């Protein structure tokens, strides 16, 4: 049972060096080559980032941890990025698998307690060595620096799991570059691990996963599994609905189907704002994709004035400090057309019935709307590999005006059921909405 800080340091070093298609090789690749949300992109140019991470890590050696939330006596635990995710994650898991959780651990709020002086000294010298490497070389600078933080996180969580005799962990942050390393260590210590990726494509952040169980919340995930079969290692695949669908699905199960003819909804991913705020990017140029989709949609609205457009802002765009800027952004595309914003105070998922046809580029709202048996069209201008060729989602995708025009005009003359049947996407719907 690897529970001392010294043993965890040794394990992290081993994983960092591991290569190949084994579980540890996949975990090692993610540590070295993955992109993390834990540091801004500017950290790539910060030669002192290793020493800064060491300073932050040393402050996490303490007796009490603010990252622990108690739920009950169950021997099942939840791992989240931040305590603010607790309620959503807990409700989603308990609803989907009908199992209660006993405790939650917020990764970077965990404290490392009960560490011997000799282990602290070993950690200090190891961290300083990493700091020097980051100072001297830019190669893998951020990933190497994060080893310091990840080691403290891994040790703190493992120690709590062992003390509480936890038997099963649900990891709600599988996209982080150390999540597969955590899976390897926990499974090695006899703890069952379930990874819960978002409804978005696995190819973005989760094409490499190691766990006992992996949750798929979209049929598209099963199609991706064929492509990533060598880098996704698991024993069981669990099929759940989209993350928050349990909150609103009853609305669409109970309501009578009312068709709002010639109405289109654009569901924003907020890519222009993410770019403006310099958030972590992916290989996909989502800003460009969304910009092209808006241009095509603007052209369509001018050509077919009988259609009405509703813009559903991303939650970040609705924040008070960005709302006016967001309004101006969309006005530049649709001024003079018949359009409006959706209610800012109501989540988009509760307004699916407001429009007949939905359009988006790379948002989880795609899967949520399809799950509720509502028409959806995807813009994928310049998005390499999504959707995959000949996949089900490729049937409802466009990357030029002509394709968008054809999809909208055809969909506007179809019932929801005809749309799903025509495009072979019936399995995306909630089981009770499949006709």
Image (cartoon, helix red, strand yellow):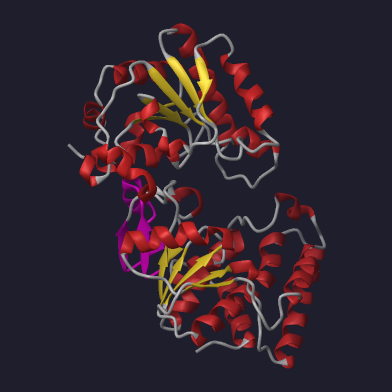
Q: Residue at x 40, y 80 (%)?
A: 167
Instruction: Work out whether residue 411 or residue 53 is closer to the camera in this orientation and state it.
Output: 411
Across and down, in percent, residue 308 comes to: 44, 15
Q: Residue at x 33, y 55 (%)?
A: 240
Q: Does 371 sit above or below residue 71?
A: above
Q: Is residue 371 left or right of residue 319?
A: left
Q: Is residue 60 left or right of residue 360?
A: right
Across and down, in percent, residue 21 comes to: 44, 66
Q: Is residue 60 left or right of residue 365?
A: right
Q: Is residue 7 visible?
A: yes
Q: Residue at x 24, y 24 (%)?
A: 415
Q: Quadrant of the C terminus?
A: top left
Instruction: Work out whether residue 138 or residue 216 is closer to the camera in this orientation and state it.
Output: 216
Across and down, in percent, residue 231 comes to: 42, 60
Q: Does 340 sit above or below residue 373?
A: above
Highlighted range, magenta: 211-239
């Amino acid at each position: 049972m690897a529970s001392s800080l010294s043993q965890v340091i040794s394990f992290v070093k081993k994983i960092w060096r591991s290569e190949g298609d084994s579980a540890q090789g996949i975990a090692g690749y993610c540590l070295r080559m993955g992109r993390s949300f834990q540091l801004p992109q500017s950290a790539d140019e910060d030669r002192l980032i290793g020493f800064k991470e060491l300073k932050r890590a040393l402050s996490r050696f303490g007796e009490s941890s603010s990252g622990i939330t108690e739920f009950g006596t169950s021997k099942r635990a939840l791992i989240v990025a931040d305590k603010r995710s607790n309620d959503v994650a807990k409700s989603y898991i308990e609803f989907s698998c009908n199992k209660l959780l006993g405790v939650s651990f917020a990764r970077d709020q965990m404290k490392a307690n009960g560490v011997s002086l000799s282990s602290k000294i070993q950690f200090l010298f190891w961290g300083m060595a990493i700091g020097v490497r980051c100072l001297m070389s830019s190669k893998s600078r951020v990933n190497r620096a994060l080893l310091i933080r990840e080691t403290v996180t891994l040790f703190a969580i493992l120690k709590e799991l062992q003390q509480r005799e936890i038997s099963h962990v649900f990891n709600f942050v599988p996209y982080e570059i150390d999540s597969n390393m955590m899976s390897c260590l926990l499974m090695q210590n006899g703890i069952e691990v379930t990874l819960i990726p978002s409804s978005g494509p696995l190819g973005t952040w989760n094409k490499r996963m190691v766990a006992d169980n992996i949750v798929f919340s979209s049929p598209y995930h099963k199609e991706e599994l064929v492509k990533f079969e060598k880098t996704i290692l698991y024993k069981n695949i669990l099929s759940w609905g989209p993350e928050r669908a349990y909150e609103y699905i009853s609305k669409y199960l109970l309501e009578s189907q009312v068709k709002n003819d010639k109405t289109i909804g654009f569901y924003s991913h907020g890519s222009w704002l993410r770019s403006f705020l310099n958030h972590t990017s992916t290989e996909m140029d989502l800003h460009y994709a969304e910009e092209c989709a808006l241009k095509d949609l603007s052209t369509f609205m001018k050509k077919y004035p009988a259609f009405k457009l509703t813009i559903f802002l991303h939650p970040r765009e609705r924040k008070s400090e960005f709302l006016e800027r967001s309004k101006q952004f969309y006005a530049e595309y649709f001024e003079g057309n018949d359009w409006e914003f959706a209610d800012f105070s109501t989540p988009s998922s509760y307004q699916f019935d407001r429009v007949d046809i939905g359009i988006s580029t790379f948002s989880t709202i795609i899967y949520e709307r399809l799950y509720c048996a509502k028409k959806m069209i995807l813009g994928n201008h310049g998005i390499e590999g999504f959707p995959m060729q000949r996949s089900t989602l490729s049937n409802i995708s466009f990357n030029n005006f002509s394709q968008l025009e054809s999809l909208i005009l055809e969909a506007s003359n179809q019932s929801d059921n005809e749309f799903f049947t025509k495009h072979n996407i019936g399995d995306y719907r909630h089981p009770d909405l499949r006709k």
